[in-house]
Structure formats: C-alpha cells, structure tokens
C-alpha cells in the first residue's frame, strides 16, 4: 500500500509532533497561531509543509482507518 504519494497529512508535515499516536498529532504551526494544536494525523491545513522523512504516524493512522475496523476500543 502506497502512502507516500501526493497525499497531504499532518502526520507528514514538518511542524507536527507525535501526540496521541497514531491518531492525533501536535502541530507547532497551529500552536504559534493560538489555535488548537491537537489535530487528526490524517488532516492537514494551509500551512502544510512536507517533511523529508515520512513519519510512521500516517502509516499507522491509515492502517487503523482502513484495516482493522473491527477493533474499536
Ligand atoms: Zn509523527
């Protein structure tokens, strides 16, 4: 499964930090703008800036979203 294509996700933006792995991330851009910095890993905003090295957040969040939908905890 390819996840490192054109998709823009908070989880592969360079201002994210892992927060509630893998579903939520902490966005330092939003933090500086006094907005709620806790966002969905699979969301993205206008300040998106691709990170050079893909983070596992996106991969794991996609896996949870698409894969094991039986697992609801
Ligand atoms: Zn991450």
Image (cartoon, rainbow, N blue to C red):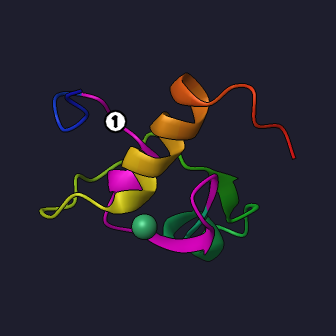
Residue 54: where, in percent of width, then height?
22, 57
Please state the extent of the stretch shown in magenta in the rendering.
7-24
- At 59% across and 76% down in the image, what residue appears? 32
Q: Residue at x 19, y 27 (%)?
A: 6
SS type, badge 1: loop
Q: Is residue 44 left or right of residue 50?
A: right
Q: Is residue 57 in the magenta section?
A: no
Q: Which residue is mark 1?
A: 8
Q: How many marks?
A: 1
Q: Position of residue 17 (x, y in %)?
A: 49, 75
Answer yes or no: is residue 51 visible. yes
Between 10 and 68, the one nearer to me in the picture: 68
Q: Which residue is drawn at the image coordinates 87% and 47% (left, top)?
A: 73
Q: Quadrant of ligand 1?
A: bottom left
Position in image of residue 25 (x %, y %): 59, 63
Examine the image and state in which quarter residue 51 appears: bottom left
Residue 47 visible in the picture: no
Residue ranking furthest to the right: 73
Residue 22 magenta-drawn?
yes
Check the picture and name the quadrant holding the N terminus.
top left
Of 72 and 43, which appears nearest the observer? 72
Vertical relation: 10 (above or below) 4: below
* Disc 1 CB within 8 Å of nearest ligand 1 atom: no
Q: Residue at x 47, y 36 (%)?
A: 62
């Amino acid at each position: 499964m390819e996840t490192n294509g054109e998709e823009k996700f908070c989880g592969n933006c360079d201002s994210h930090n892992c927060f509630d792995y893998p579903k939520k991330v902490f966005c330092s851009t939003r933090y500086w703008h006094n907005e709620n910095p806790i966002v969905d890993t699979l969301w993205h905003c206008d300040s998106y800036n691709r990170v050079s090295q893909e983070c596992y957040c996106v991969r794991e969040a996609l896996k949870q979203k698409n894969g094991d939908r039986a697992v609801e905890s």
